[in-house]
């Protein structure tokens, strides 16, 4: 993920690529640049479960729509042909119904 010229690396769970990506993007967009601009970005990425624990990841994924509707960020998903995003359209549709401002690039 690229934010402010810095690359942040993490490994999403394969079944939750969308949720984990939105969670991480939302988190970093709310951290002041002064806090992350001098951070290490060349570290070997680890899984979110390894970093936060299974219970925290499960809770955040369950509440991702609630978390995303409490901010003013608009998300636009751009993916490549053949990308394996399980149940992508169903998940986006549900996020939209829950009030998340997310669109898919045509």
Image: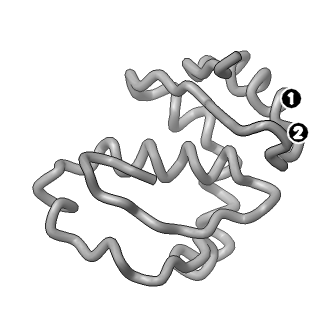
Task: Please report the residue visible at 53 percent of the width from the left and 68 percent of the height from the top.
Answer: 10
- Note whether 7 is above or below 102 in the view shown: below
Q: Is residue 32 left or right of residue 71?
A: left
Under circle 1, the secondary element is helix
- Note whether 82 is above or below 73 in the view shown: below
Residue picked out by circle 1? 90
Quarter-wise, where is residue 56 in the image? Answer: bottom right
Q: Residues within 10 Å of mark 1 (few under 14, many from 20)?
A: few
Q: Is residue 89 left or right of residue 3?
A: right
Residue 33 x %, y %: 17, 50
- The span from disc 1 to disc 2 (Cα, nearest Å) is 5 Å
In depth, the one of 35 and 104 nearer the eye is 104
Quarter-wise, where is residue 104 in the image? Answer: top right
Task: Please report the residue visible at 45 percent of the width from the left and 28 percent of the height from the top.
Answer: 70
Residue picked out by circle 2? 87
Q: Is residue 64 left or right of residue 14?
A: left
Q: Residues within 10 Å of mark 2 (few under 14, many from 20)?
A: few
Residue 99 x %, y %: 61, 17
Residue 35 x %, y %: 16, 60
Task: Please report the residue visible at 11 percent of the width from the left and 56 percent of the height from the top.
Answer: 34
Q: Any mark on residue 104, and which? A: none
Under circle 2, the secondary element is loop
Q: Is residue 97 left or right of residue 99?
A: right
Q: How is the image coloured?
A: one colour
Q: Quadrant for the C terminus, please.
A: top right
* Circles 1, 2 touching at the beta carbon (< 8 Å): yes
Residue 47 x %, y %: 61, 75
Q: How many marks?
A: 2
Task: Please report the residue visible at 62 percent of the width from the left and 53 percent of the height from the top.
Answer: 20
- Note whether 9 is above or below 16 in the view shown: below
């Amino acid at each position: 993920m690229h934010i402010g010229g810095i690359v942040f690396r993490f490994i999403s769970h394969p079944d939750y690529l969308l949720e984990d990506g939105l969670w991480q993007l939302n988190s970093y967009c709310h951290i002041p640049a002064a806090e992350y601009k001098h951070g290490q970005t060349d570290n070997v990425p680890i899984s979110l479960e390894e970093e936060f624990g299974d219970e925290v990841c499960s809770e955040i994924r369950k509440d991702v729509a609630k978390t995303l509707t409490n901010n003013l960020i608009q998300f636009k998903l751009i993916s490549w042909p053949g990308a394996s995003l399980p149940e992508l359209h169903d998940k986006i549709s549900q996020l939209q119904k829950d009030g998340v401002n997310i669109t898919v690039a045509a």
